[in-house]
Amino acid sequence: MIAGATGNTYVLVGTDVGGTIRCRVTGTNGGGSTTAIGAQSGVVSAVAPANTVLPTISGTAKQLQSLTRTTGTWTGSPTFATQWLRCDAAGANPVAIASATGSTYVLTAADVGSTIRSRVTGTNGGGSVAAESVQTATIVSVRIISMVSGGSGTGFFGDGLDYVSARMNNPTAMTYDAAGNLYIADSGNHRIRRVTTGGIISTVAGTTSSGFSGDGAAATAAQLFQPQGMAFDATGNLYIADTSNNRVRKVTTGGIISTVAGIGTAGSTGDGSAATAAQLNYPAALAFDAVGNLYIADYNNHRIRKVTTGGIISTIAGTGIAGFNGDGVAAAAAQLNNPYSLTFDAAGNLYIADFGNNRIRMVTPGGIISTFAGTGIGGSGGDGAAATAAQVYQTKGLTFDAAGNLYFAEDGGNRVRKITSGGIISKIAGTGSYGYTGDGGDALLAKMMSPSGLAIDAAGNLYISDPDNSRIRKLTP
């Protein structure tokens, strides 16, 4: 007896499949009741399921993000199997993704540039029917962040070993030589360290003891004091901003160190004379122009100094008074506020991380200064629009890629940002929160601690010195 089946009609259900059906009719009057049972039906067969509402996909069409499918709506009480499909940009030419058979799917690098569909197959005793979702938007890539050096803790360790296992102490700046070796200012260890293209780390200048000594001898036996910015000249000599010694040092290709600017006493005297007789005050960054002149970010003097190939020093930007007094004037008449980083573009324009003014400034070859990024208000607003209308926060670590895009670090913002050659700004790494998370994932979801120096290798990977974490981190393109 089928519970509740007492009407003139009966709709067959799944539990009837494989059986037969009879109808028992009981007639009743005043004389009593009589029952008659009709002939049995044929064997009940199953009806294949039918999809009435297509499966759907939710989630963000972005590498490393998770997509989730619904099964849609079906008749026939089927069970379900799922297959995720990789399609072209129009959603055509689907290819089954190996092992992607769950209700969720995490997008990978292989999906970038494609769209994704979900095929749901409903099955019951009557057969199987497949239904596919509409394709997603085209999957976009993300930059993946990873830790490449310093993961074993703060300190000094690792020379002669793979740099992944090395320890550093407040690495602040980086640069590459012409051979592709990476140089790191291991500021808290008072050393400059080199990572070969094979990944082996060593010390090229400094000892763990801070101080000033060693000119005229091997750089590895000399003392430095919290070195920061570095730059190579055209012949491969390494120049070091020996920041707390108020000097600029030079290491020849033969490994001999000397002083090329600064007497060691903090001050601002000496313009128009030999750089070795001049005073500097916390030189933080260095850069060379196309003809070999050396530029120094004289941080606490709020100036940019220039040392000619003949060794004569002068001020080319900044009055020595911290502040901001406008753009469109001669750079030497403009105020800066703790300039921290320098770089040149291919046209010979000098870019200055004007740290305390929350700006990036540009000085043309003709000596006129302007603001390239930032409004002067520290913050993170303005992504997706003109960099000149955006907020930036304590700018550091300027570097250009081969396409002319400028990258910079935000010490106070705990982010790395990019300005396209067309002047549009965006964030590329960091949540803005101070901390350490995110390795192996989307760089925008990672935390950093006052990122400082940036460098780009020949493959376009961006390296970030994360000084308060005592690590070097890497962003893949």
Image: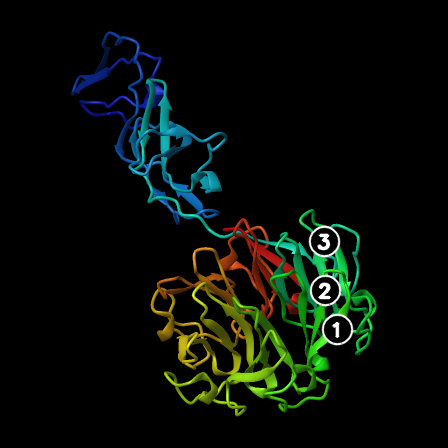
Residue 120, placed above or below residue 341: above
Q: Earlier in the sequence, mark 1 or mark 3?
A: 3
Residue toward you, 468 or 78? 468
* 157 to the left or right of 120: right
Mark 3 vs mark 2, foreground winner is: 2
Residue 237 image point, x, y percent: 67, 64
Secondary structure of the residue carrying tag 3 is helix
Q: CA distance from mark 1 to mark 3?
A: 27 Å
Residue under label 2: 252
Q: Around disc 3, counting alpha carbons within 10 Å, would you say few (fewer than 14), some (14 to 19), or many (20 or more)?
A: many
Q: Earlier in the sequence, mark 1 or mark 2?
A: 2
Horizontal side of 365 relative to 285 (left or right) equals left
Picture residue at 72% right of the left edge, 88% below the top: 265
Helix, strand, or loop for circle 2? loop
Q: Which mark is residue 163?
A: 3
Q: Residues within 10 Å of mark 1 (few under 14, many from 20)?
A: some
In the foreground, 89 or 120: 89
In the rendered view, tell whether residue 157 sits above or below residue 338: above
Q: Are marks 1 and 2 in contact (CB under 8 Å)?
A: yes
SS class, disc 1: strand
Residue type at tag 3: Tyr
Q: Which residue is mark 1?
A: 258
Way the structure is coloured:
rainbow
Question: Within the image, what quadrant is residue 253 found in?
Answer: bottom right
